[in-house]
Amino acid sequence: MQRRFLVGIDLGGTNCRMALVDGQGRVCRRERFSSRDFDHVDGLMAKIEVICREFEIAVRGAGGEIVALGAGVPGLVDYQGKVMVAPNLSWLNGVDFSARLAELGQWSVRVINDANAIAWGEHAWGAVRDNSSFLAVTLGTGVGGGLVLGGRLWVGSDGAAGEFGHVVVEPDGRPCRCGSRGCLEQYASATGILRSVREELVQGRRSSLESLDADALTALAVGRAAREGDALALDVLNEAGRRLGQGLAMIANVLNPEAVVICGGVSLSLDLMRPSLDGELSRRAFEVSARRLRIVAGELGDDAGILGAAHIAGCTDALWP
Amino acid sequence: MQRRFLVGIDLGGTNCRMALVDGQGRVCRRERFSSRDFDHVDGLMAKIEVICREFEIAVRGAGGEIVALGAGVPGLVDYQGKVMVAPNLSWLNGVDFSARLAELGQWSVRVINDANAIAWGEHAWGAVRDNSSFLAVTLGTGVGGGLVLGGRLWVGSDGAAGEFGHVVVEPDGRPCRCGSRGCLEQYASATGILRSVREELVQGRRSSLESLDADALTALAVGRAAREGDALALDVLNEAGRRLGQGLAMIANVLNPEAVVICGGVSLSLDLMRPSLDGELSRRAFEVSARRLRIVAGELGDDAGILGAAHIAGCTDALWP
C-alpha cells in the first residue's frame, strides 16, 4: 500500500504557509510566501498549485500519494468551504475556495476557519487528542475559538460558531471592534493585555516595562517581566486570567465539555494566568462542570492550524451540523 | 399494527404529573400527585406503577401498546439516566431512576433533566420542530436551559450542560445561589423580575404594583401592569429583556444556532421584552449569527416537559455525547 500524505494550508492575512504532512502528523516539507502579493484568488491558486506539484513529486519519490488537501482561512467559512467574509483578505470574499482547491488534484478537500483548524490540530495530534468535547481558545492579536463536540467540529448554522473572544465579560467595558463592549478579547488577547499595561502606566504605576519602546512592548515581554517579579505585569496577567476564567465558567455551565485547550502566543503565559483563572472558574461555574474541565496549553504551537487543516481534510463526517 | 403510546413523567419538587401520550403528541390521559408525599424512591415507584397499570389498561382497550416511558427530573442526571443530584428531592440523589422505571414494563426508558425535557418537547411537537440546533430557555422561578445541536440533546460530559441561567451578565452584580454573582437568573427569572420591582419601589418610584400584597405581586402581575402602561413594570421587563439579549448574544456568537425558544411563565411577557432583547442582541452578536437566530415563544406551555420526556424515551440516539 502506498504511504498516504496530507497537505495543510494556513492562509493568514500576512503569510501563507503550506506543509506536506505524513499520516502521523509529522511535517515533511514546508513552504511559506506572502499573502500580500495577491489581490485575486487566481494568483494565490497559481502559487498553491506550484507548491502542490512540488509536494507531489517529493511524495512520489517516497512511494506515496497525497490524499487530502485542507486549508484554514481567517474569516467566515460556510459548511461547504465557501469563504463568506475574510476581513483581511477581502478578495477571497464569496470565493468557493474548496471548489478551487479541488480542481488541483484527485484528493479530498476541506476549507475551514483558521481557529477551527487550530482546534482540530490539537485534537488530531496535540493536547486534546483524548478529548471528544472541548473548546480551543486562541489567544493572539485577538481571541478566537473552535468547538469540538462529540468528536466533530461544531461550526454552527452559518459556520460562525466558536467566537469565544466576543463573550461579554464586562457589559459596559472597553469598546470592541465587533460593535459590542467588554468582550473577552479586549482583556485577554495580546492587544488587550498591552492596553491594560498602558492604562496602568498612564496612571503612574512603576514597572520595568516603562523602559521598553513601542516595538518591544509585547505580550511576550509582559510575560517575561511577570516572571522576573514585575508587579504591574503580574497584575495585568492576573486580570487577563480572571477574565478568561469568567468566560470559561460560562462555557463550563452551558456546554459541560471535557477540556479547554489554550493556544496562541499568550498561552505561553498560561501558567502565570492559571491562579486567577482557576479561582474565577471555581467561583462561577457549577462544581461538577468545573471539576470536569481540564485546562491545558496547546502542544503544536504555530503548526496547529496547518496540521488541523491537513488532518480534517482527510476525515469524513468531521463537521457539525 | 398496534397503535403506539408513550408515557411522560414530569417530576417536580412539588408535584408529579404523568401523561399518556399518543404518537402525534396528544395527551390522552393525565394524572397528578404530590411529590412531597414521599421520602424514598420506593414510595414514588409504587405510585408510578399504579398509574402505569391504569394507562396500560386504557391503551389495551384502544388496541394499542405503551412502547416508551420517559421522565424529566429537576436535577443533574447523567447520560445513563442516573440522578446525580436533585436539590429539591434529595431522596433521589444517586438513584438509578432509569433502571427503576425499566423494571415496570417492556418499554424503552429515558430519564433526563427537566429543562432538557422541555427543550425536547418543543423540538418534537412545538415551536422548534423544524430546527435542529437551538437553545430552549425556561424563564420560571429560576432560569434553565436545554441545548439541542445537530438534532440531538447536548447534555455534556456529566449531564450538566445547558445551565444558561448562570451565564454572567453583570460580573459584580446580584449574588446568586450558585455562588457566583450577576447570573442571568438574577435578572430574567420571575424571582429576578420581582426583585427588580422591589428595588425600584424601595427607591420611591410610583407604580400600580405598590398596591399588591406579597402573594399578588407575581411576574404575571408585572406583565399585566406593563400592558396597562405602568412605567416601572415596563422598565423592569425591558431590563430583563436586555439581560436576556446579552446572554443570547453570547450563545449566538459561541454556537451560531438556528433558534432560541423561550418557555416558562415569564415567556408570556416575551413580546414586552423583545425590543430591548433584540437591541442588545444586534449590538452584541455577530451580524450573521444574530440574523440567523430565530427567537420564539414555546407553544406547549406546561406540557412541554411531559411531552418531551415521553417523546425522547422513544428515540434512539437522541442524546449527545
Image (cartoon, coloured by chain):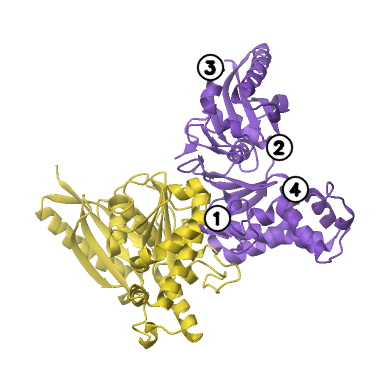
Chain colours: A purple, B yellow
Label 4 – label 2 distance at C-alpha = 12 Å
Give the label on residue A251, or none.
Answer: 1
Q: Which residue is label 2 attached to? A: A302
- Amino acid on which disc 3 is placed: Gln
Q: In which quarter of the image is residue A201?
A: bottom right
Q: Are marks 1 and 4 on the same chain?
A: yes
| Mark 3 Cα shell of 10 Å, populated few (<14), some (14-19), many (≥20) | few
Q: In this view, does B169 lie above or below B310?
A: below
**Side of A262 relative to B153 (left or right):** right
Q: Disc 4 marks which amino acid? A: Leu
**N-term mark: 3 or 2:** 3
- Do tag 4 and tag 2 residues touch (Cβ < 8 Å)? no
How dense is the environment of label 4, judged by Cα within 10 Å: few (below 14), some, or many (20 and up)?
some
Measured in 3D between alpha carbons, the distance from the residue under mark 2 to the one under mark 1, in whole angstroms, is 25 Å
Q: Mark 3 points at which residue?
A: A106
> The disc numbered 4 marks a residue on which chain?
A
The residue tagged with tag 2: helix, strand or loop? Answer: helix
How packed mark 1 is, by other alpha carbons closer than 10 Å (few <14, some 14-19, many 20 or more), is many
Chain under disc 1? A
Dividing the picture into quadrants, the one containing residue B275 is: bottom left
Same chain letter for marks 4 and 2: yes
Identify whether B2 is placed above or below B41.
above
